[in-house]
């Protein structure tokens, strides 16, 4: 295989040829030059992998270097993307060869986990990935969506949380007073958006670090990708202390046959550091004149939005798999996160691609007393053992549960985990769960 289609990284000069498998495999109408213009913003040539047939690139994969928030911590992670094989070369094992090369490279770089968004959910479990973050997409009828008034008990007596608490907790609710809203070009709101994003990121397993290049990509907004919608706009929620939330959105004007306004809005991102900012942003976006339908993508499963509305069913929701996680260095990955309950058990792991992960591991951890204080709780320890196992599973199941969203008990119900001691699945499942739910809002 590797002799027939040798695999190696490519340089910047090869970007156009490198993009070709993706262009064809994803059936896109975007030109190579257009895609290259976007890819260049975040390109890491040394992390590309191209499969060659002679001098022609027939398969591709890249990894981006991210920090990934995990329960109670942050780990270096490989963000896998641009995985494609030319239609003429499918089902010859090229993807399998790319995955094996890439995982070896990630391991060599000391990144304990890899993450990806899958085009189809049937592809990646065989390479040890598990569905770790569920995401929701919304369609909201703005004509009938109304925000409910807040219960009296939710109105704070003072204007801000105690300073000590605000300092101790990453992304703490800093203020509860009113916000003002400002609409601006995204290019002139980068500092405010980054400040809000960085306040939210440590609180949410699944969120990735965003370098300057990734911010440039987020607001690049090329016309060929708009599909008739307006340029992106930024809605900033702020007070005298600074930004407390933002939304990135676009609109599209439309009118029905009777001349009645039927405009649409797409909310690309909406982050808030506190409930007042969250409510103010949604209240404004869902009440715009001439807009009848709002859509939002990659929202978290514990999103406050349905609870903000009088009729939560107006948030018509579809849920699907979002981020997939692969534990590449299993003991390092399991020791790098914190656990919601005390845990001490032996796990028998199968891993077809990384033999160093396979076998029996004893996982011990004290409980994190409160999720946001978890970093101060006892270290988790994951070490080799010869003791009898309590649970047997594939490494993909641990990847699925790693960020605290997917329950091992659900996988056990599907027959994917063997419980060898009564109660062990519930113990590990609840210890690995987390609050808040993981969220992967940024596609890569
Ligand atoms: C998905 C894709 C990369 C697979 O590449 P490939 O070189 O044909 O894959 P391989 O030949 O290495 O297949 C390896 C295994 O995965 C299976 N497989 C491949 N693509 C699959 C798919 N889309 N759905 C289910 N199984 C798939 C193969 O049947 C094979 O199974 P086996 O090991 O049991 O025989 C390629 O078809 C493609 O480019 N598709 C369109 C773009 C895309 O979806 N990329 C993934 C982005 S996240």
Image (cartoon, rainbow, N blue to C red):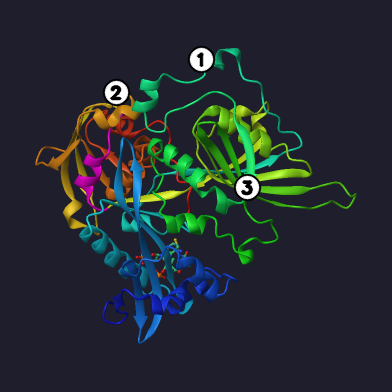
Left or right of 320? Residue 348 is: left
* Quarter assignment of residue 365: top left
Q: How far apart are marks 2 and 1 (CA)?
A: 26 Å
First along the sequence among labels 3 and 2:
3
**Residue 162 to residue 228: above or below:** above
Residue 184 circle label: 3
x, y percent for residue 105: 25, 63
Secondary structure state at the residue bearing disc 3: strand
What residue do we see at 42% from left, 63% from top? 42
Image mark count = 3
* Residue named by callout 2: 369
Q: Which of 305 and 247 is in front in this view?
A: 247
Crowd rating for badge 2 (residues with CA inside 10 Å; few <14, some 14–19, many 20+): some
**Residue 118 to residue 94: above or below:** above
Q: How far apart are marks 3 and 2 (CA)?
A: 41 Å
Choose mark 3 or mark 2, whichever is in front.
3
Q: Which of 127 and 418 is in front in this view?
A: 127
* Residue named by callout 1: 158
Q: Distance between the residues labelled 1 and 3?
A: 31 Å
Secondary structure state at the residue bearing disc 1: loop
What residue do we see at 72% from left, 44% from top? 293
């Amino acid at each position: 295989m590797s002799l027939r289609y040798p695999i190696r990284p490519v340089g910047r000069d090869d970007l156009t040829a490198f993009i070709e498998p993706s262009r064809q495999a994803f059936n896109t109408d975007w030109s190579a030059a257009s895609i290259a213009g976007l890819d260049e913003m975040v390109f890491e040539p040394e992390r590309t992998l191209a499969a060659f047939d002679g001098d022609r690139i027939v398969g591709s994969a890249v990894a981006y270097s991210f920090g990934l928030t995990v329960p109670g911590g942050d780990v270096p992670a490989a963000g896998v993307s641009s995985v494609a094989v030319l239609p003429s070369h499918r089902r010859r094992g090229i993807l399998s060869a790319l995955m094996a090369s890439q995982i070896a490279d990630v391991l060599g770089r000391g990144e304990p986990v890899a993450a990806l968004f899958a085009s189809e959910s049937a592809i990646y479990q065989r390479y040890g990935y598990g569905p770790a973050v569920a995401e929701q997409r919304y369609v909201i009828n703005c004509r009938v969506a109304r925000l409910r008034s807040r219960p009296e008990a939710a109105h704070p007596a003072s204007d801000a949380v105690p300073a000590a608490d605000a300092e101790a907790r990453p992304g703490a609710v800093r203020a509860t007073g009113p916000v003002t809203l400002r609409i601006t070009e995204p290019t002139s709101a980068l500092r405010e958006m980054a400040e809000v994003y960085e306040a939210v990121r440590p609180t949410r397993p699944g969120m990735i670090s965003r370098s300057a290049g990734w911010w440039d990509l987020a607001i690049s907004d090329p016309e060929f990708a708009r599909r008739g919608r307006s340029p992106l706009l930024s809605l900033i929620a702020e007070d005298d202390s600074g930004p407390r939330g933002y939304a990135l959105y676009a609109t599209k004007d439309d009118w029905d046959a009777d001349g009645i306004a039927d405009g649409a809005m797409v909310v690309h991102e909406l982050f808030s550091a506190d409930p007042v900012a969250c409510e103010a942003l949604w209240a404004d976006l869902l009440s715009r004149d001439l807009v009848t339908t709002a859509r939002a993508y990659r929202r978290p499963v514990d999103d406050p939005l349905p609870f903000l509305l009088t009729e939560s069913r107006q948030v018509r929701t579809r849920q699907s798999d979002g981020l997939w996680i692969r534990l590449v260095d299993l003991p390092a990955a399991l020791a790098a996160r914190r656990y919601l309950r005390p845990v001490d058990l032996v796990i028998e792991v199968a891993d077809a691609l990384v033999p160093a992960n396979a076998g029996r591991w004893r996982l011990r951890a004290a409980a994190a007393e409160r999720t946001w204080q978890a970093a101060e709780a006892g270290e988790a320890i994951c070490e080799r053992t010869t003791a009898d196992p309590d649970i047997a599973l594939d490494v993909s199941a641990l990847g699925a549960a790693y960020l605290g969203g997917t329950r091992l008990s659900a996988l056990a119900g599907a027959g994917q985990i063997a419980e060898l001691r009564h109660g062990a699945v519930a113990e590990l499942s609840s210890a690995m769960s987390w609050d808040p739910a993981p969220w992967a809002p940024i596609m890569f």
